[in-house]
Image (tube, rainbow, N blue to C red):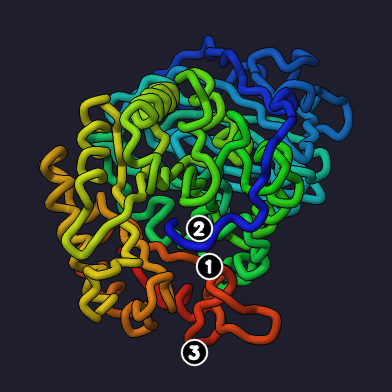
Amino acid sequence: MRIESLGRLRLAAAATAAALVIPAALYLSTGSASAAGSNLLTNPDFASGSLTGWTCDAGTAGVVTSPVYSGSSYALAATPTSSDDAQCTQTVSVQADTTYTLSAEVEGSYVYLGDTSGTDTWTPSATSWQQLSLSITTTASQTSLTIYIHGWYAQPEYYADDFSLTSGSGTGGTSPTSTSTGTTSSSPTGSASPTPTGTGTVGSGSVGKVAPYADMSNNQEPLLNEAAEAGLKTYTAAFVISAGCEPIWGDTLPVTDDPTMDQEIATAKADGATPIVSFGGSGGTELAMACTTESSLQAAYQSVITHLGVTHIDFDIEGAPLDYTADNNLRFEAIAALEAADPSLVVSVTLPVLPTGLAADGVAFLALAKQDNVRIDLVNVMAMDYGSSFTGDMGQEAIEAAESTLGQVQADWPSDTYADIGVTPMIGQNDTSGEIFTEADAQSLVSWADTEHLGRLAFWSVDRDQPCTGSVSGLPSCSEISQNALDFTKIFDSYTG
């Protein structure tokens, strides 16, 4: 964002991601994908006395003889760390357009069961064996399914046993969206992801319809937690920048080894808020300008995705990074590789805008993405700091910016609609004198977005959604207008899409 600089900007980072291991291989079930009612999972109750059939994060998991679920001899025991959620996965062959039921017995705090296409369920606390169960419907072309179980960072050891994945009947026709029959999930790994077509579409019900930014470098996360408790379901964690080619939030610790930020994210998650991670911003050095190869850049992005378990990522590209073609080529190569490795990953880009739309460099950025065959699921515009282009109505000009941007996006992807567009104003006083985004502006924008079914509404930022009082002062920490705490969050959260 073209706004306050990162408060904990670091000069260097020296840490290893060895504690976070991306599983290199996934086991295929030998069971028949067409046998309705049969368990498709290999070693579902760990009767082999080992992890055969399962791929677990290195050094986090094993089998135990106690506690075990009734009738079993062994169970999975996995211990999260401050940098690892102790995930175990298994991949099986499946039929397209078919509904499957996944279940498992679990014990522990913050245990998550799901599949990597985006459906999951969880329990905040199972003091004795508790069944988690959900329904998964495969897409029209899907032939494999990866299921997972994991805990949460820095939480105690969890146990799991008696897994089952069974098929029902084929649905035929267009594939429906997968839905969970278990507890509604707030996991970063949760929420169904859309099938990528054109630039992709976020789609009704997916993570990210309302996703205001939270400045993870500004030490204002408690307000994020209050917003989550008030009902906020999604937020955009900003910004991941670089120290060398190491992803950092803005202090002196790598994202993959930052217990403070991990705990803040875990707390917000426990209160119901799922993060989208945003790379870039206006402060510090963006990773594509620091990493020198596509493989190292992809690995840097992937380490954050895997560590936080997110399914949606954002690239906030502004200033110098927007204008360097070489860096953008490297970035797009890395994003394309991420998408190839995980087709369900949802990717948005956030770009500066005027009421008349994207500037020439923004248009060129999207054209290069199209040229490099990168799937952009959503183009989010920063409706703020217009300067001499401002005419006096921040709400209306945010709407005009979205309308103009859609026309520009359709030059590359003609089938795109407002479902592929996002709008992010800066609430309250903007950096530019005279530009003030009011609560009335927010209500106007939400009303228009409801009519047009906008893909995403956001604002900068949750930690500013409060009046300036006492020790809270200045644009990084408050809106500098008269309001109650979380007024804008509540207005934006009324958006239904």
Report the residue at 54% width, 53% height from top.
Answer: 237
Proximity of marks 3 and 2: CB atoms separated by less than 8 Å: no
Q: Are marks 3 and 1 in contact (CB under 8 Å)?
A: no
Amino acid type, callout 3: Ser
Residue depicted at x 78% and y 31%: 78
Residue 60 horizontal/vertical position (percent): 78, 27
Task: Give the CA separation, mark 2 to mark 1.
Answer: 8 Å
Disc 1, SS: helix
- Can I make out residue 343 in this image? no
Position of residue 460 in the picture relative to residue 175 (left or right): right
What's the residue type where badge 1 is placed? Val
Q: Are marks 2 and 1 in contact (CB under 8 Å)?
A: yes
Residue 76 numbered mark, or none: none
Looking at marks 3 and 2 on the same chain, the residue that comes earlier in the sequence is marked by 2
Residue nearer the viewer, 140 or 226: 226
Q: Amino acid at mark 2?
A: Tyr
Q: Is residue 368 above or below residue 239?
A: above
Where's residue 492, x and y in %?
A: 40, 72
Task: Give the residue number, with chain letter if any, for mark 3.
Answer: 482
**Residue shown at 48% from the left, 85% from the top:** 481
Camera-near label (3 vs 1) is: 3
Which label number is shown at residue 462? 1
